[in-house]
Image: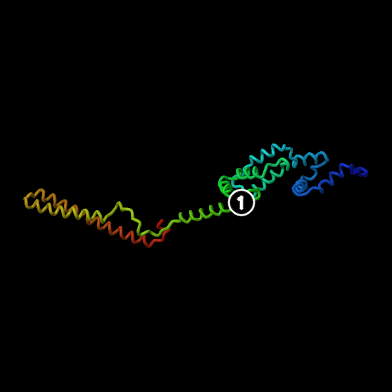
Amino acid sequence: MLSINLNGVTNEDVVVRLFPYTLQGATRSWYFSLPSGSITSWEILQEQFLTKFSDDKSTATLINDLSNLRAESKEPIKDFNSRFNKLLNKIPTTSKPSEEVRNEWYIFSLPSNIAIFMDRANKTTLADNMKEAIAVEKRIIALEKKNVVEERKSKKVSFKEDPKKKQPKDPFDLEGLQKVLKTMSNEMVDIKKQVVETSSKSLTSLIEEILRLIQSLLTLLQVLNQKKKKRKLLLTYLPMKKRL
């Protein structure tokens, strides 16, 4: 055991000061990130170190944890592979599950949209399955991006009218109303002739009044129709934004 004989310096002081320089990687980063003055004795250092890095789980617990491990939502497969391997490496070599069981647990732990392709790939080693899972993930991401682009294209609004597409029927078809009134006028003229022949003055007067009313309506419709055409022509030359 290390023995130092210096006035006021104990073996514990030396061990505490030398111990950090034996650390590497995550343990070294952890130690040098501790607040200054937080470690005042070997007991405190030992307690904090073991609390942070010791794994007192039993082998059975580790195996159970591995079998129940699942990839998190939107977790990259590469990151999940690291988690899976890290937990697998904690299990003692003599207690590790067989390659077949590892593959089965690994595939079952993947998202369903990836796992379905893994079954078809039929890889025999865990390393090959992990590589295949990353490749499948890349293909799925590429396909999703392609679908998003196509969906955006389909949703773009086109202001070009399709000549083959039937235009909706105008509920205020003024030209159609004019045709109807003209037909009515012609029929009323024919009726008037028949009434004149029967010498019915009162009925003749009524028909003439109806004809004048129809003529007034025709005149009004002509005016409205002209205004409608002018408005349509005006809208044709207006900028698209103003129209909206």
Q: What residue lies at 69% left-to-right and 45% top-to-bottom? A: 86
> Residue 222: x percent and y percent?
25, 58
- Amino acid at pointer 1: Glu
Query: Which image quadrant is residue 219 in?
Result: bottom left
Quadrant for the C terminus in the image: bottom left
Q: How is the image coloured?
A: rainbow
Q: How many marks?
A: 1
Question: Percent from the top left, x then y, of residue 207?
Answer: 13, 51
Taking 103 as reference, is 160 above or below it? below
State the SS at label 1: helix
Return the residue nearer the eye: 163 or 59.
Answer: 59
Mark 1 packing: few (<14 Cα in 10 Å), some, or many (20+)?
A: some
Looking at the picture, how far across and down is residue 211, in whole percent? 16, 53
Name the side, left or right, on which 2 lies relative to 122: right
Residue 31, x across and y down, in percent: 77, 46
| Lateral position of residue 151 relative to residue 183, left or right | right
**Image quadrant assignment for residue 142:** bottom right
**Nearer to me, 84 or 220:** 84
**Does residue 180 appear to the left or right of 92 in the view shown?**
left
Q: Depth check: 148 or 45 in front?
A: 148
Residue occupying the point 67% across, 48% down: 82
Task: Give the residue drawn at x 13%, y 49%.
Answer: 206
Q: Name the residue nearer the viewer: 237 or 118.
A: 118
The correct choice, above or below, for 229 with respect to 93 in the image is below
Residue bearing mark 1: 132
Instruction: Please name the residue shown 60% across and 43% down the image.
Output: 108
Locate the N terminus by quadrant: top right
